[in-house]
Image (spheres, rainbow, N blue to C red):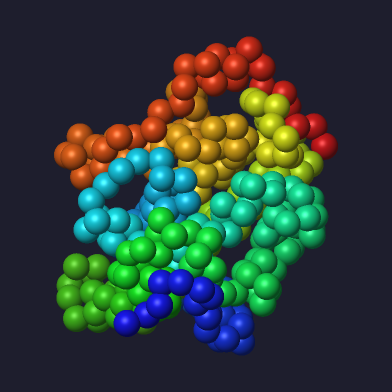
Amino acid sequence: MLSNTGIQKSESLRIIKIRAALVYIASMGIFFVPFDWSLVWLTLLTFSFRTFGWEAGHHRYFSHRSFKTSRAFQLILACLGASSGHKGPIWWATLHRAHHKHADMPLDPHSPVQKGRMYAYIGWVLDSANADTDLDAAKDLSKFPELVWVNKYHYLFPYILLIGVFSIGQFSDILGPKVNGFSAVIWAFFFSTFLSLQGGFFVNVFTHGPIPKFIGYRTFETRDTTSNNWLLCLLSFGASWHNNHHRYMNSARAGFYWWELDMTYLVLRVLSFFHIVWDLHEVPAAVLLEGKSGAMTIVNK
């Protein structure tokens, strides 16, 4: 049985770098395999499930406990999030909690203000200082043996998805006669992984620090440089309403106002209707009023 205390060692950085390079290179294969609309729909499906996995799971649930669920669905969220390529839930949550505690200060794990946009994009993932998981920093998560296991062997879940996607393309007629296992993997696994990673990486890069005024605004005066970014709301499933999130991080909703589309919150509301999740933390009325009185300061740089 894996220990639930101390430092859980990561796989080698060399392996992590090879996997990342493979995802980026293989994603370019979409330009070289026969196109079929069924590949697009399957890619959107795998992208949506996985992005919901890391944003609803790794982020809003494991990092911030913004809603409640059963132990079984908690495990499903962990597996979905791990399948996206965003590593394990405890690793993600510990670093994200540190990000909030030290936002845009020297101890922030991925602030572009401190270490530049390229480091905030992917450098932090490839940094040995961030590779391992401090299980003691998230005892509310590491007390569950299954989460410790998923965190350790997170890389198995993308492989399981890869095998599933290949099997659908190769051994069934669901995707039509033009599609085989290879083209299905290029689109619905590698390109889907690439897109899901961009959702998280771009939020780090383009919701902190100076950004073009046509994509960013600050609704709240926070102690950091966060902004809301409408351009990334679909790609990140709502994570790009980042200034909102840093104002009240315990909310299950990142898009605080009706014009801020938040796909993750919409799905959570549907799941709450079926009692799969419950006790969604809402934004306090005082915070919403504060934001309306602030009237959106445009980030103009």
x%, y% of residue 244? Answer: 57, 32
- Quadrant into which the N terminus falls: bottom left
Quadrant of the image occupied by residue 213: top right
Vertical order, 253 against 34 (above or below): above
Residue 149 visible within the image: yes
Q: Is residue 30 left or right of residue 99?
A: left
Quadrant of the image occupied by residue 45: bottom left
Task: Name the foreground residue: 31 vs 291.
Answer: 291
x%, y% of residue 142? Answer: 40, 65
x%, y% of residue 226? Answer: 68, 39
Q: Name, please, the residue furthest toward the right.
A: 301
Quadrant of the image occupied by residue 15: bottom right
Q: Residue at x 41, y 72 (%)?
A: 4
Q: Is residue 67 left or right of residue 85?
A: left
Q: Residue at x 58, y 59 (%)?
A: 95
Vertical order, 31 against 267 (above or below): below
Vertical order, 59 against 4 (above or below): above
Residue 185 visible within the image: no
Q: Residue at x 72, y 39 (%)?
A: 224
Q: How many marks?
A: 0
x%, y% of residue 258? Answer: 45, 23
Q: Is residue 276 left or right of residue 288?
A: left
- Quadrant into which the C terminus falls: top right
Q: Residue at x 75, y 32 (%)?
A: 299
Task: Name the foreground residue: 205 vs 135.
Answer: 135
Task: Name the foreground residue: 219 vs 177.
Answer: 219
